[in-house]
Image: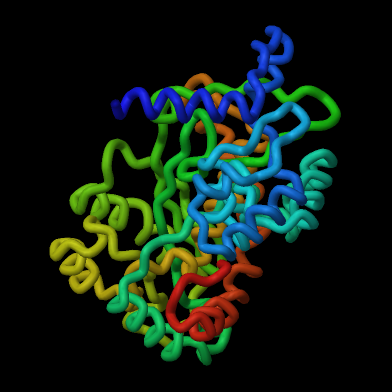
């Protein structure tokens, strides 16, 4: 009896609404596409929703369209759910790190090969390094202690660090700008571990650069002590230091790498009588020799140059260290007060340097 009443109700609905003929394939393909709600239908839905009707009841009471169809209750329910919300289309890709104006300037300098201008001094993506709260406090204290030191103080400091060069491109850079207009850029290679690498130790003082020393293997404490005894000390003692400090004519700077901070390395400096600069951890932006290494790295891999063998890359590195790097030594030493002031302004966090 219940099934008979259901069939009777459906038959009555068909008689009142009119039995539609089956549409043709072309019409069916168009009808399968869900059309958007018109402004009139949206007004109908709003008016019926104010009467506290359910989405099913609203869909049943909407005026039929010219093709004798009505929006489904799901369409009505979706419209009521998203009503008043602002649709924001998500753009693909990561967020922009540079402004459109700076991007146009970079492209212009890449095309004209003027990559050493101040606007495009760094053409690779700058990476942020983690600074803990403890190291932030130490960086801030160091900057406040040495920010007022005159240039004569920094002229007696030797800055040192190591650098890795890869055959395929600059070590540590994951994005670069390439030429998109003009001549077609040369194809680039990407090999496992950069195709091969070489580590170098170097130092800079106001009076000149040290001998560029290639480190074989990893730089542990034993190899680092050999570099200090055979490379750094003979070079440093020949420089024209001031004679008002008879005990130690210079102050040596090094970071807190394991080989540098080892107890045997500290004992070596104490035995020889070399004063160390109390350098805070996680502070590559305060070390000017980092900028010197960046300049050499860009000149070695100028315009995306890559190398097939280490024997081809090593002469280029030595040549850039002898000819290009000395041009920037004095400017980097003069930037020390600005670096420390920038660290103070940033509260001990990372600076633009």
- Count of numbered marks: 0
Is 191 left, or right, of 1 in this rendering?
right
**Residue 322 visible (yes or no):** no
Relative height, residue 190 to residue 63 (above, below)? above
- Residue 333: image quadrant is bottom right
Q: Which residue corresponds to the image point at 44% horizontal and 64% vertical from the top-left?
A: 284
Q: Which residue corresponds to the image point at 62% horizontal and 38% vertical from the top-left?
A: 71
Residue 280: x %, y % from top left: 34, 74
Which quarter of the figure is the C terminus placed in? bottom right
Q: Nearer the viewer, residue 16 or 210?
A: 16
Q: Which residue corresponds to the image point at 70% horizontal and 29% vertical from the top-left?
A: 68
- Most extreme residue toward the front, as rendered? 1
Visual colour scheme? rainbow
Is 244 left, or right, of 28 in this rendering?
left
Is 3 left, or right, of 327 in this rendering?
left
Q: Which residue corresponds to the image point at 61% horizontal and 57% vertical from the top-left?
A: 48
Which quarter of the figure is the N terminus placed in? top left
**Residue 214 visible (yes or no):** yes
Relative height, residue 323 to residue 71 (above, below)? below
- Residue 185: image quadrant is top right
Q: Nearer the viewer, residue 209 or 197?
A: 197
Is 231 left, or right, of 267 in this rendering?
right
Residue 215: x %, y % from top left: 34, 41
- Residue 348: image quadrant is bottom left
Residue 237: x %, y % from top left: 41, 66
Q: Nearer the viewer, residue 158 or 353?
A: 353
Q: Nearer the viewer, residue 62 or 134?
A: 62
Residue 244: x %, y % from top left: 44, 88
- Most extreme residue toward the top, as rendered? 25
């Amino acid at each position: 009896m219940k099934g008979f009443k259901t069939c009777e109700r459906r038959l009555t609905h068909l008689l009142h609404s009119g039995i539609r003929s089956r549409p043709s394939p072309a019409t069916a393909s168009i009808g399968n596409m869900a059309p958007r709600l018109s402004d009139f239908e949206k007004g109908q839905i709003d008016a019926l929703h104010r009467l506290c009707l359910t989405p099913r009841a609203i869909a049943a009471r909407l005026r039929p369209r010219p093709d004798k169809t009505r929006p489904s209750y799901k369409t009505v329910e979706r419209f009521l759910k998203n009503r008043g919300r602002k649709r924001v289309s998500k753009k693909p890709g990561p967020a922009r790190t540079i402004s459109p104006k700076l991007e146009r300037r970079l492209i212009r300098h890449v095309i004209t090969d003027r990559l050493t201008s101040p606007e495009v001094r760094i053409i690779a993506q700058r990476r942020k390094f983690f600074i803990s709260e403890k190291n932030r406090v130490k960086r801030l204290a160091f900057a406040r202690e040495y920010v007022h030191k005159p240039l004569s103080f920094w002229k007696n400091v030797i800055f040192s660090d190591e650098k890795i060069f890869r055959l395929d491109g600059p070590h540590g850079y994951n994005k670069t700008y390439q030429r998109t207009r003009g001549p077609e850029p040369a194809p680039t290679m990407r090999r496992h571990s950069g195709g091969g690498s070489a580590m170098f130790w170097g130092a800079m003082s106001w009076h000149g650069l040290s001998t560029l020393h290639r480190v074989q293997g990893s730089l542990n404490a034993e190899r680092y002590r050999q570099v200090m005894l055979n490379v750094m000390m003979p070079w440093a003692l020949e420089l024209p230091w001031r004679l008002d400090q008879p005990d130690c004519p210079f102050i040596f700077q090094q970071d807190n790498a394991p080989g540098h901070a080892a107890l045997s390395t500290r004992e070596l400096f104490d035995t020889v009588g070399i004063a160390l600069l109390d350098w805070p951890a996680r502070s590559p932006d305060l070390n000017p020799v980092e900028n010197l290494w960046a300049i050499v790295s860009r000149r070695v891999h100028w315009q995306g140059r890559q190398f097939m063998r280490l024997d081809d890359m090593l002469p280029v590195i030595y040549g850039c260290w002898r000819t290009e790097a000395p041009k920037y030594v004095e400017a980097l030493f003069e930037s020390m007060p600005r670096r420390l002031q920038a660290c103070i302004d940033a509260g001990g966090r990372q600076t633009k340097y």
